[in-house]
Amino acid sequence: MTIDIIRLQIPTPVGSAQVELNEGGFTAVRFVDLTTPKTSGNRHKICDVKSVLEAEPMLRDYAKKTRVGILQGLESLLELQWADRLPLVTTGTPFQISVWDALARIPSGCTHSYRWLAHAIGKPHATRAVANACGVNPLAYFIPCHRIIRSDGQLGGYRWGIETKRFLIERESSQGNLALIL
C-alpha cells in the first residue's frame, strides 16, 4: 500500500516553510529560505500555496477530522499562531518520540532547558541525547523544539538557524507571557 504525500511550500512570518502531509496528518515541516529548491529530498515537486483555501482542494480525499486539523495547522503556520491538537505523524526511535511528546506539551510562550526536558522524560543524564532528538525533529514549529534553551539562558542551537529560533520565541512572548523555566 502506498501512501500519497502532498508537498506544499507556504509563506510564514519567518520565511517559507515546506510541509509534507499524508492522510494521517503532517509528516514534516521545514523552514527554508528562498534559495532552497522547491523539491524535497526525493525530488518531488512542491506546490506553492499562499492561503489555506488554495490547499483545501488537495485534501478532499482525507477524512474530515484530519482535513480540518491540517487546514488549522496550515493557518497556524501562515500566521505563526500556535494551534494545539494537530494531526501529526511522527517516526523516530522510542527515545526521540518521548522527547517530541514532551516538547508538544510545553505551552506557547514558555521556554525550558535541555536539562529540564531530560528530567521531564525521566532521563536526567540524557541532556545531550535530548538535544540531538530536538535537532532531528521532523516537524518544525508543531513540535516546538524552539522552546528549549540552554540552562544558562542562552538560546543554544536550532536546526533552522538561531535567528529563526529567536524570532519564534520573541513572537510567542509577544502573544502572551513568556515564562523562562530552567
Image: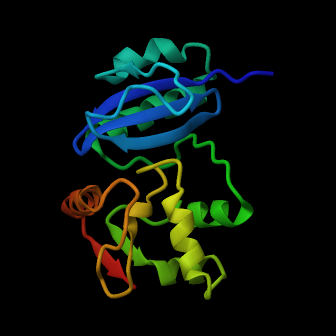
Q: Residue at x 51, y 63 (%)?
A: 134
Q: Position of residue 77 (x, y in %)?
A: 35, 39
Towards the viewer: 67 or 20: 20
Q: Residue at x 53, y 47 (%)?
A: 85
Q: Quadrant of residue 21?
A: top right
Q: Looking at the picture, does residue 133 appear above or below residue 5?
A: below
Residue 1 as seen in the image, left or right of residue 175: right
- Quadrant of the snapshot with the C terminus: bottom left
Q: Looking at the picture, does residue 64 appear above or below residue 173?
A: above
Q: Looking at the picture, does residue 155 appear above or below residue 97?
A: below
Q: Position of residue 112 (x, y in %)?
A: 41, 76
Residue 126 as seen in the image, left or right of residue 173: right
Q: How many marks?
A: 0
Residue placed farthest to the left in the image? 174
Residue 93 as seen in the image, left or right of residue 143: right
Q: Quadrant of residue 34?
A: top left
Q: Quadrant of residue 51?
A: top left
Towards the viewer: 145 or 102: 145
The figure's colour scheme reads: rainbow
Q: Residue at x 64, y 26 (%)?
A: 23
Q: Looking at the picture, does residue 118 appear above or below residue 78?
A: below
Q: Position of residue 53 (x, y in %)?
A: 35, 17
Q: Residue at x 24, y 45 (%)?
A: 14
Q: Position of residue 36 (x, y in %)?
A: 33, 34
- Quadrant of the snapshot with the N terminus: top right
